[in-house]
Amino acid sequence: MSDFVINDQIRIPWSELTLTYSRSRGPGGQNVNKVNSKASLRWNITTTDAISEHLKYRLTKRWGNRITTGGDLMLHSDTHRDQRANSDACLQKLREILLDISRPRKPRIATKPSRGAIERRIESKRQQSQRKSTRRQSRRIDPE
């Protein structure tokens, strides 16, 4: 098992993934204070050959807030009480992120506003214009 398989095109070598553990803030009672159950996954996307440059670009555009200045994608999980479940959750998050960016986006289809929407907009503008014009007329009255 030398690769973490996402799909047919994306395979990440395990040597590129770094899992570390620390104290969790999640469930577990007193166990939280003495067991390192929080899992942190680190993967440097700038040096990897597992994904194409196009996917790297989409990853930084979509998930840039999780990427450090050094180019590491950081994922954390502390929802479970044991290390194994949290590390599996981190790997699952990575899989979901990569599947999300590898899916081609549907092209946007340009639409026109309906006739009713156009008429409502024009009617609203007419009412606003009328409202403001009555304000102007009431200011012009000179006291005699």
Image (tube, rainbow, N blue to C red):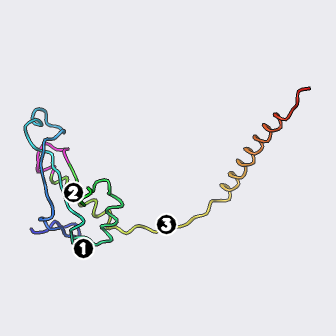
Type of amino acid at the residue the image marks with label 1? Gln
In which quadrant of the rendered view does residue 134 lie? top right
Judging from the image, what secondary structure is the residue with disc 2 in?
helix
Q: Quadrant of residue 42?
A: bottom left
Q: With respect to residue 75, does 45 lie above or below?
A: below
Locate the C terminus and report the quarter of the image it occupies: top right
Task: Residue 108: give its label.
Answer: 3
Q: Position of residue 25 (x, y in %)?
A: 18, 38
Lower position in the chain sequence, tag 1 or tag 2 = 1
Q: Quadrant of residue 8?
A: bottom left
User: Which element is circle 3 on?
Assistant: loop
Camera-side residue: 132 or 46?
A: 46
Q: CA distance from mark 1 to mark 2?
A: 17 Å
Picture mark count: 3
Per the image, the residue denoted by label 2 is: 92
Picture residue at 75% right of the left edge, 45% below the top:
129
| Residue 9 in the figure: left or right of residue 136 | left
Does the magenta portion include 112? no
Q: Residue furthest right?
A: 144
In the rendered image, residue 88, in percent from the top left (x then y), is placed at: 16, 54
Q: Does residue 138 lie above or below 11 as drawn? A: above
Residue segment shown in magenta: 77-86
Give me the residue at 10% from left, 35% from top: 33
